[in-house]
Image (spheres, rainbow, N blue to C red):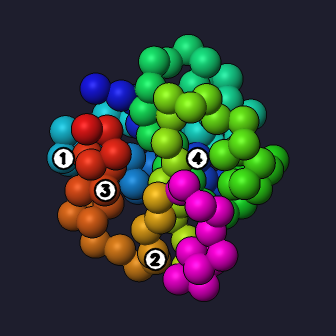
Amino acid sequence: MGSILIALPKIEDAKHISDLLKRRGLESIVCTSGAKVLSMVHELDSGVVICGRRLTDMHYTQLAEYLPEFFEMLLIASQNAIGECMPGIQTLGIPFRASELTGTVEMMLA
């Protein structure tokens, strides 16, 4: 099974999502910057990066460009932002149910 990285600018939001995933048996790594995500993905085999539109140091489009092909991105954003999303990126609109989040992540990891 692949790894799950959560990259959000507010650590509280990232921990909340991490807790939601943990209740479903999915362990994750919390990051607050794109640089941290990029350093972590090179230590891991494959997985999913859950992120918002903007991190502390870069936009999600920049992060997507630098992600290795064995990692997928799940963008969590407003419906307006999702409409402008880059092709090839999975999306989840805010607000979302915990079951929607975990189902999407499990599908991406399968």
Q: From the viewer's perspective, is 87 left or right of 59?
A: left
- Amino acid type of disc 4? Ala
**Which residue is the site of mark 1?**
24
Find numbered disc 2 in the image and state the secondary structure of the residue it sits on.
loop
Q: Note whether residue 56 is visible.
A: no
Query: Is disc 2 surrounded by few (<14), some (14 to 19) or many (20+) residues within 10 Å?
Result: few
Q: How far apart are the alpha carbons under marks 4 and 3?
A: 16 Å
Asked which quadrant contains residue 54, the reply is: bottom right
Q: Mark 2 or mark 3: which is in front? A: 3
Report the magenta residues as a range.
79-89
User: In the displayed image of the protein, which residue is found farthest to the bottom?
Assistant: 80
Q: How far apart are the alpha carbons under marks 1 and 4?
A: 19 Å
Contact, CB < 8 Å: mark 1 with mark 2?
A: no
**Which residue is the site of mark 4?**
7
User: Which is nearer the N-term, disc 2 or disc 3?
Assistant: 2
Q: How far apart are the alpha carbons under marks 1 and 3?
A: 12 Å
Q: Mark 4 or mark 3: which is in front? A: 3
User: In the displayed image of the protein, which residue is found farthest to the left?
Assistant: 24
Q: Residue placed at 41% from the left, 56% from the top?
A: 16
Q: Mark 1 or mark 3: which is in front? A: 3
- Amino acid type of disc 3? Thr
- Amino acid type of disc 1? Arg
User: In the displayed image of the protein, which residue is found farthest to the right?
Assistant: 57
Disc sitting over residue 94 in the figure: 2
Contact, CB < 8 Å: mark 2 with mark 3?
A: no
User: Which is nearer the N-term, disc 1 or disc 2?
Assistant: 1
User: In the displayed image of the protein, which residue is found farthest to the top?
Assistant: 43
Placement of the N terminus among the 4 image quadrants: top left
